[in-house]
Amino acid sequence: MYRRIGLHIAFWLAYWLLTGYIESVLAGSSFSDWTLFAKLRLGYTVELFTLPLKMAAVYWFLYRLLPGHVAGRAAGSVIVEGTAVILAAVMLYRLLVQHVIFPYLYHMPYESGSLAYQASRFLWSFLDIVYVMGIAVAIRMARLRIQALKREKQLVEEKLQSELRFLRAQANPHFLFNTLNNIYGMARKQSPQTAEAVLKLSKLLRYMLYECTADTVPLSKEVEVAENFIELEKLRYGKRLVVHFQKEADCLHYPIAPLLLLPLVENAFKHGSGESRFDCRIDISLALEGGLLSFRVSNTCDEPARETTAGIGLQNLRRQLELLYPGSHRLEAGFEAGLFVAVLQLGSPKTKGASNTNASLT
């Protein structure tokens, strides 16, 4: 509130200083024997007398006739009112010049002159008022436009955040359902490792609920979650499952949006190891390649399955990547020589309020 008032005061002060100087220069031709100080004093005094009239006309336009203040009114009535305000301001301006400024400030009688002269004076007064009104209205319209763009950007951001929350909320129950099924199978067999599996699941859930609410997390956190999930799956599959996880130490501090690696690891177990009748092998590698984070997961698979490439987990992940890494990600998944291979490459994540400037990977 106070900042807004201060800006208005600053605008009118700047306008008064500029127009007062211009008036002193114009009046100087009629008072050549006056000192510079006397001319400046005259110019600023004249503008000070006309300033309240101009302010009244400007604020009438700003807060009664601009978009946002004319809801429900016909366009014709707004135009008529605007024209009437300008004409009234010009007439009052001329009366002020004739009966105050000339006799009391210029100390000379006002000469009406010819009709052409009167018309030129009327036009000058009209331009003087419309000039300041135009500046004020332009500033106001620009401010309204900026506010509208900010609101639009905020709404888009809120929509994207809502969709992202929905995607994560959709992925978490999907993961939880699969894991609980695994633990249920272990409990049915009265496996002594059931308690350990429940403990590992609780650690995963704690991360999902409380530790991944930030825009980005260190890659080491995501690696830890993936490793906990792998250990959880090893309890289920036992010796028939072999997992190799190779990671470069220098990439563990790389910032990454949370819960992007786990879906690929889970997919390898669900659609590869979980469906295989034989011993299973999963190879995972994580490295920085040319400034990009590269995550590769390959798993043995009996035969191609439509669900492997179009399951809810990968569909969900693709949409999250579109929201979080627009133009700076690549996700490829398919079969290569009896293996199902998924490769994810990431640039820098999109941050709130900043546009993405990364080179496109798609």
Image (cartoon, rainbow, N blue to C red):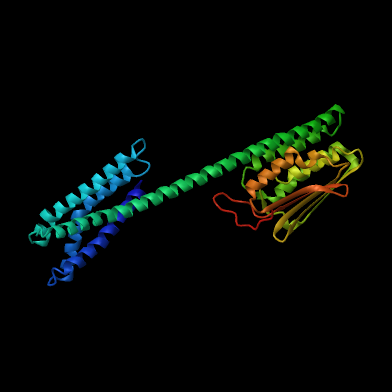
Expressed as whole percent of the image width and height from the top left, the position of residue 167 reads 66, 39
Which residue is at the far top? 188
Residue at (65% x, 42% y) in the render: 211
Residue 203 visible from this viewpoint = no
Left or right: 40 in relation to 269: left
Front residue of this view, candidates 124 and 177: 124
Q: Decide which of 352, 113 is in the foreground and name it.
A: 113
Q: In screen coordinates, is 247 left or right of 280?
A: left
In the depicted view, which residue is nearer to us: 225 or 175?
175
Image height of 183 relative to 359, above or below: above
104 to 337, vertically: above or below: below
Residue 205 pos. (x, y %)? 70, 37
Give the farthest residue toward the right: 278
| Residue farthest along the bottom direction in this orientation | 33
Q: Quadrant of residue 82?
A: top left
Q: Is residue 19 left or right of residue 344?
A: left
Residue at 63 percent across and 48 percent down: it is 324
Residue 77 visible in the snapshot: yes
Total numbered badges shown on the rendered structure: 0
Does residue 64 appear left or right of residue 334 in this picture?
A: left
Q: Residue 109: image x %, image y %?
A: 7, 59
* Residue 151 position (above or below residue 98): above
Query: 118 or 310, which lies in front?
Result: 118
- Image quarter for residue 168? top right
Can you give x and y, in whole percent of width and height, for residue 242 in the image? 88, 45
